[in-house]
Image (cartoon, grey):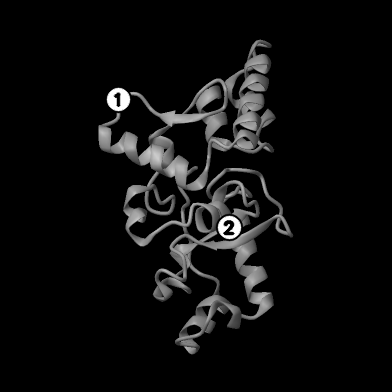
């Protein structure tokens, strides 16, 4: 999970929000939802899921997640800073947070919000692909890492295996003596940007 640097909302999205007080998410025209998803994914998240860092395409493999669930706080339904492009998978990420974990309102303060915090400062990737707290963190920060991993199931077998494979590939490529910039370029089209940064640095 990486920091998401939000930009200004799309004009068509903001225009709809201002003219349709009390609207439901389903009232947003389909074309605006598609354009919003593309803006979030391509411009703000470098084509990676906002939670898992899986590389995504702007098609059926991603959706717009409301970080704070609409059912918990309807006032954030059209808050641009509450919208994150996420992978569609029930076993981890946004769908897991909402459906399997079923996050409660009082738990949001216990997890990292990638829009306002930088999880890269707190996450460490083990050689087996699993996430643990970085060394030197306060106990409260360690607890927040563990809770974030739990809520989004970021140590799901599928994710951990893919991160482990990437770590191995980077390690093998580094043996060729390539410089840091060349390594970064070689892996730039892969998932898990924060894993790359950790392993290539």
Q: Is residue 80 above or below residue 172?
A: below
* Tally of numbered tags: 2
Q: Quadrant of residue 75?
A: bottom left
Outermost residue, right direction?
Answer: 59
Percent of width and height locating residue 184: 61, 29
- Would residue 24 appear left or right of 143 to someone viewing this image? right
Q: Nearer the viewer, residue 76 or 39?
A: 76
Q: Secondary structure at mark 1?
A: loop
Q: Nearer the viewer, residue 76 or 151?
A: 151
Q: Residue at x 66, y 25 (%)?
A: 165
Could one spot residue 43 in this view of the protein? no
Q: Is residue 32 above or below residue 163?
A: below
Residue density around tag 2, few if under 14, some if 14–19, many if 20 or more, within 10 Å: many
Percent of width and height locating residue 94: 55, 54
Q: Secondary structure at mark 2?
A: strand
Percent of width and height locating residue 179: 60, 18
Residue density around tag 1, few if under 14, some if 14–19, many if 20 or more, within 10 Å: few
Q: Residue at x 57, y 55 (%)?
A: 95
Q: Are marks 2 and 1 in contact (CB under 8 Å)?
A: no
Q: Which mark is residue 51?
A: none
Percent of width and height locating residue 186: 69, 28
- Would residue 10 appear left or right of 162 to someone viewing this image? left
Q: Residue at x 38, y 35 (%)?
A: 122
Q: Residue at x 50, y 78 (%)?
A: 14
- Would residue 55 appear left or right of 108 to someone viewing this image? right
Q: Is residue 150 above or below residue 180?
A: below
Q: Which mark is residue 85?
A: 2
Q: First in sequence, mark 2 or 1: give its number.
A: 2
Could one spot residue 115 in this view of the protein? yes
Q: Which mark is residue 136?
A: 1
Q: Nearer the viewer, residue 180 or 66?
A: 66
């Amino acid at each position: 999970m990486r920091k998401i640097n939000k930009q200004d909302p799309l004009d068509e999205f903001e225009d709809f929000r201002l003219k349709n007080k009390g609207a439901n998410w389903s009232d947003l025209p389909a074309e605006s939802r598609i354009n919003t998803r593309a803006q979030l994914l391509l411009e703000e998240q470098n084509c990676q899921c906002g939670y898992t860092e899986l590389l995504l395409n702007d098609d059926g493999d991603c959706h717009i997640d409301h970080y704070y669930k609409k059912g918990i706080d309807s006032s954030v339904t059209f808050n641009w800073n509450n919208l994150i492009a996420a992978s569609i998978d029930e076993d981890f990420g946004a769908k897991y947070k909402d459906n399997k974990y079923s996050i409660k309102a009082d738990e949001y303060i216990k997890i990292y919000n990638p829009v306002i915090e930088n999880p890269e400062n707190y996450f460490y990737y083990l050689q087996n692909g699993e996430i643990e707290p970085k060394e030197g963190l306060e106990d409260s920060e360690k607890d927040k890492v563990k809770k974030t991993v739990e809520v989004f199931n970021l140590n799901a077998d599928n994710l951990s295996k893919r991160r482990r494979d990437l770590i191995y590939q980077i390690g093998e490529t580094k043996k060729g003596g390539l410089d840091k910039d060349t390594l970064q370029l070689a892996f730039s089209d892969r998932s898990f940007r924060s894993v790359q940064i950790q392993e290539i640095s």
